Image (cartoon, helix red, strand yellow):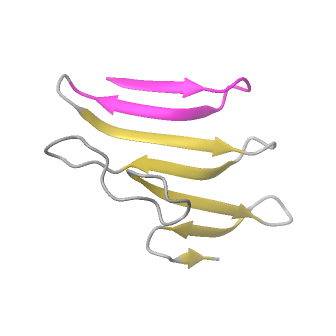
């Protein structure tokens, strides 16, 4: 089953996909004042127990991997940071 949560502006800010036994995928999205996604946290869980695993290098949140998007002057993505410490420009 797939479940989406929306904010007041109608942006999807969370998605969860699960089966009868466990959560298969979980993600949270943060949007800016222009309704652009700028931060994505995806759940990182132990497959056996379902407990959170590790922590984000971005902000230390337990059990997630993060992607951060920086927008340039023209409103287009300029840089993307991911957990591998890679910055794509």
Q: Where is residue 86 drawn, in percent x and y?
A: 51, 77
Q: Where is residue 59 drawn, in percent x and y?
A: 55, 59
**Displayed quadrant of residue 6:** top right
Q: How many labels, in total?
A: 0
Q: Residue at x 66, y 27 (%)?
A: 7
Rendered-image quadrant of the C terminus: bottom right
Q: Where is residue 73 drawn, in percent x and y?
A: 86, 66
Q: Nearer the viewer, residue 73 or 59?
A: 59
In screen coordinates, is 64 left or right of 34? left
In screen coordinates, is 13 left or right of 45? right
Indicate yes or no whether the magenta region holds residue 30: no
**Displayed quadrant of residue 20:** top left
First to last magenta residue range: 1-19
Looking at the magenta stretch, what is its main secondary structure? strand
Q: Where is residue 81 drawn, in percent x and y?
A: 57, 69
Q: Residue at x 23, y 40 (%)?
A: 50
Q: Residue at x 59, y 32 (%)?
A: 12
Rendered-image quadrant of the N terminus: top left
Instruction: Work out whether 40 lies above or below 69.
Output: above
Instruction: Work out whether 2 lies above or below 60.
Output: above
Q: Residue at x 48, y 66 (%)?
A: 57
């Amino acid at each position: 089953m797939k479940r989406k949560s929306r904010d007041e502006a109608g942006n999807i800010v969370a998605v969860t996909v699960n089966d009868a036994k466990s959560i298969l995928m979980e993600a949270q999205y943060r949007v800016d004042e222009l309704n652009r996604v700028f931060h994505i946290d995806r759940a990182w869980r132990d497959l056996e127990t379902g407990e959170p695993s590790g922590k984000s290098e971005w902000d230390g949140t337990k059990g997630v991997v993060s992607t951060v998007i920086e927008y340039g002057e023209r409103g287009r993505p300029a840089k993307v940071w991911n957990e591998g410490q890679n910055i794509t420009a």
